[in-house]
Each structure stands twice: as C-alpha cells, then as structure tokens.
Amino acid sequence: MYDGLSAVYDYGQNGAELKNNIKEYWWKSMTQMNENVVGIDSAIFMHPTVWKASGHVDAFNDPLIDNKDSKKRYRADVLIEDYIEKLNDKIKKEVKKAAKRFGEQFDEQQFLETNQRVLGYKQKQKDIMAEFVTAMDAGDLERVRQLIIDLEIACPVSGSRNWTEVRQFNLMFDTKLGSVSEGANTIYLRPETAQGIFVNYLNVQKTGRMKLPFGIAQIGKAFRNEIVARQFIFRMREFEQMEMQYFVKPGEEMKYFEEWREKRLKWHHAMGINADKYRWHEHDKLAHYANAAYDIEFEFPFGFKELEGIHSRTDFDLSQHEKFSGKKIRFFDNESGESYVPYVVETSIGLDRTFLSVLSACYNEEKVGDETRVVLNIPAPLAPVKVAVLPLVKKDGLPELAREILNELKFDMNCQYEEKDSIGKRYRRQDAIGTPFCITVDNQTAEDRTVTLRHRDTMEQERVSMDKVAEIVKEKVDMKALLKKLI
Ligand code: ATP
C-alpha cells in the first residue's frame, strides 16, 4: 500500500508455508539427525561490544562505486566478479563451438585443459582476481577503481565508464536502546546470527554437558544495509539465515570441514533438484581468520551465485570474545588434560536464497494437449499445501464425505478444501501452488468409499480406498521422506 521498501519483502500465505517447511527440513536435519547438534534462539539485539569483538564495526564493509552518469551505485567487488563470470560464458561458448565441430569424438575435459583460448581466459580470470585481492588486502581502493577502469567495465544502465572513487560502506543498521534523555546507547541489528551462537557457547556447553565436537544451530533474522539490492529475494536488507557452528578440537577442523561440506551438499541434493544446478566455489580471498572456505553456488535464473557458505573459522570468534569480555571460553578436554579455545567449522545458508532456489528450479510450464499448465514440482514435504480435497459437485452428500477426509488429514498436514469451478480448473490451481496430491470425491465414493488420488507431477489418477488415502498421502508428504535421504 505504501510502495514498500527496496530489498524488503513480505511472504504471502503460500510463501510463508514453503519457508516454514524449508526451515523445518533444515532444523530437523541439524538437530534431530545429529545427536551432537542442538538448536538455540538468541536475540536480535546484542551488546554493542559483540560487534566490536567480531570485527563488524571496523570491517563489515563493502567497497562501493557510483556511476556518475546513471547515478547508480554498485559494489566494486561484484562488478569485478561479474566480469570474471562473463569470461566463463566465453569459455562455455568455445566448448559449444568445439563440441559441434568435433561431434562424437569431442572430449570436453581435454579441450578445457589444452585449448589455448580457454587457457587464456582462465589465466585472465586468475590475474584479475589476484589483482583485486592484493588491492583489497592493502586497503588500496584507488587500485580497485583502476582495475575496473582497466577492464573497461561499463555501467549496465548508462553504458558509460564514468566512475567515482571507491569507498567503504558499513553494512550494519544501527538504532538506539533506551530513551535519548537517558543517554541512549547505539546498538546494531545483527548482520548475522552466528555471533548469538558464539556468545552462548559456554551456556550451551555447560548446561548440556556437551563434549567436542558438537554443534549449535540457529535460524533467525539478519539485517544488512546492502548497497545494491537487486535480484528479488536473493539480496535483501532483512533476511533469514540458518547457521550452524560446529566446535572442534584444534587440529581436527579440516576433517570436520570436509564432513560438513559433504553433508550440506547432500542436504541440497536430497530435495531432488537437478544436481547440475549446484557447484562448489573455493574462496580466492580468505578472511584473515579463516583457513578454508567454500561456497555452494546455485544456478539462479540470473546465473550461478552463492547459496551457502561453509567456512573453517579457526578460534577467531571465541578468542575475540574472550579478549573483549574478559571471560574465559575454554574447553577442558578430559582425555588429554588440556584446556583450549575450540575451533569452529560453520555452515551458513540464507533461507530466502534457498526459497528462491527451490522456487526457480521447480517452476515449470508444461504443454498438456493444447493448453499450458503451470506446475511447481516442489518436493512433497516442502509443498505449502500437501493435499486438496475436492468434491466433484456441491451436492449429493459429496461435500460431507470430502470434509470427513479433510478432518482426518488436517491434524497432520496443511490441506485445502475447494468446491468451486470445474475439477480441471481446480487441479490447475493446485498445480500452480505445488500441491502434490488432490483427492477427488465423486458419486462412486458415496457407494463404495473410494476416491480418486491425483498426482501433481505425472497427473496420474488412481482409485484408492477413502479410509486408506490419508495413510498413503502422509507417508509421501512427511518430512521423514526427505530426512531419510540424508543417511
Ligand atoms: P554475498 O557475497 O552474496 O553478499 P556473503 O558472503 O556476504 O554473501 P555470508 O555473510 O557468508 O554471505 O552469509 C551467509 C549466507 O546468508 C549467504 O550464503 C546467503 O545465503 C545469505 N545472505 C547473505 N546476505 C544476504 C542478503 N542480503 N539477502 C539474502 N540472503 C543473504
């Protein structure tokens, strides 16, 4: 009603359900499927010193640059990354051309490793990234600007290369705690949920008598004053994160880092989305405290972009909190008799980005006869509505029978009851919101208590007993169906 704010989104009735289901899938995969991972819910407002200790006050910045003609603002790092990505497109084009030329004998791997043009592009990518990393590490923003100019990067809006200088911009939102007359304190809206986990490490470890390795998981809102807020819910100013910090004995972090990389990719693959849509990206520029970092990238409609980060963060965060709070955060290892600050392996995924990955990959338009149907092939356990119960007509006792089925199902899942419009139209509406099953009640139901069970993906219809249908549907839509794929 007020035009909204850019990069701030509301989710409607179907979106909220899908979002909750993704959360449930993640939460259970962490806290139920791992004996040594527990979940917490920490506050959004935290003591301001937390953000000093974590480095966010001084260094949670993005380098920004403006185009003087279009007045559009960009992240300098993103302009450079996009340029590098375009070189990937050029490589893909070379591969396509060669595949056509060589036909069946084409060996893509060999081509990628030996073709001079491809090697040239790859070298260029490396050189650009190296120059960018060196400039950023040195805090030399003029050099970053020069790189943009040397690469002849133009503003996508104005097409011009008339750039301002590069400046650092802190992404944290601040606000005031307490009334101004009392001398209010500046506090921040958390830009990540992870710090809530670190400051609760000792509470959880002591009260739960947790032994290393163990993990703490959390889902919650995070806020970032993003410079460039484009691409729908990919980059938001208010968003949700699902993070897990895994505390391990120093020296063992690489083992668990690999373990969590594997587990996290499996979690994505279990949803049944084409595996080619996911790829690993190793960080070229490691944060000074990290000793390994990979992203899982997803092929969004606008290209491959970060979906989840898996980072080995050493003892940086806990040590910083020891230093700034003056309180010891040590784990006493009974076996070795030592006490030490644990190392951390973290998995950090954006809920909204996961939502977008599911939505974009599962949205399909299919030809059915002369018509086109819109169908969301969402994994059944994640679907906003699990089943629609549809009486064929509004009379002859069919609505009553349909309600009888609904009343049984609604304890276990989100259902819809619909009696308006032709059955075909009703099926289409359910397809479009991804409802995996429709149960249709017709005159035969009144005679023999059987119903039609219609499957969304295949549009296949089968006749099943009205008294068994709940059982059949339940098994398919239960979160267990997804969780089972993780072991
Ligand atoms: P990017 O490079 O895209 O800005 P990031 O590296 O800053 O992301 P992290 O700080 O590692 O992201 O945050 C972990 C996860 O949180 C990301 O993988 C992403 O899924 C999600 N995320 C981060 N920023 C946003 C945002 N502005 N909107 C939506 N999700 C976000």
Image (cartoon, rainbow, N blue to C red):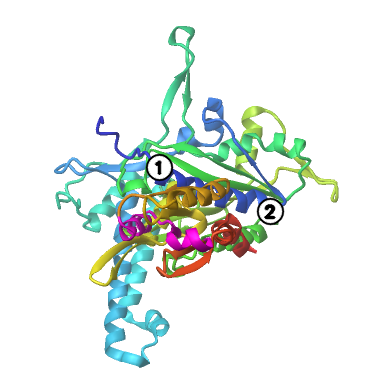
Write down the residue under mark 1. Answer: 13
Q: Nearer the viewer, residue 345 or 320?
A: 345
Q: Quadrant of the C terminus?
A: bottom right
Q: Is residue 291 left or right of residue 399?
A: right
Position of residue 51 relative to residue 364, above or below, is: above
User: Mark 1 Cα within 10 Å, few/some/many (few <14, many 20+)?
Assistant: few
Position of residue 326 relative to residue 118, above or below, is: above
Q: Is residue 150 left or right of residue 433?
A: left
- Residue occupying the point 43% across, 59% down: 440
Question: Is residue 75 a member of the stretch shown in magenta?
Answer: no
- Residue occupying the point 39% across, 61% down: 361
Disc 1 is placed on an element classified as: helix
The magenta segment: 422-449
Q: Amino acid at mark 1?
A: Gln
**Does residue 288 appear anywhere in the picture?**
no
Write down the residue under mark 2. Answer: 34
Q: Nearer the viewer, residue 302 or 439?
A: 439
| N-terminal-most mark, 2 or 1 | 1
Q: Quadrant of residue 338?
A: top right
Question: Is residue 443 a member of the stretch shown in magenta?
Answer: yes
Q: Position of residue 268 (x, y in %)?
A: 51, 60
Q: Position of residue 75 (x, y in %)?
A: 31, 46
Q: Amino acid at mark 2?
A: Asn
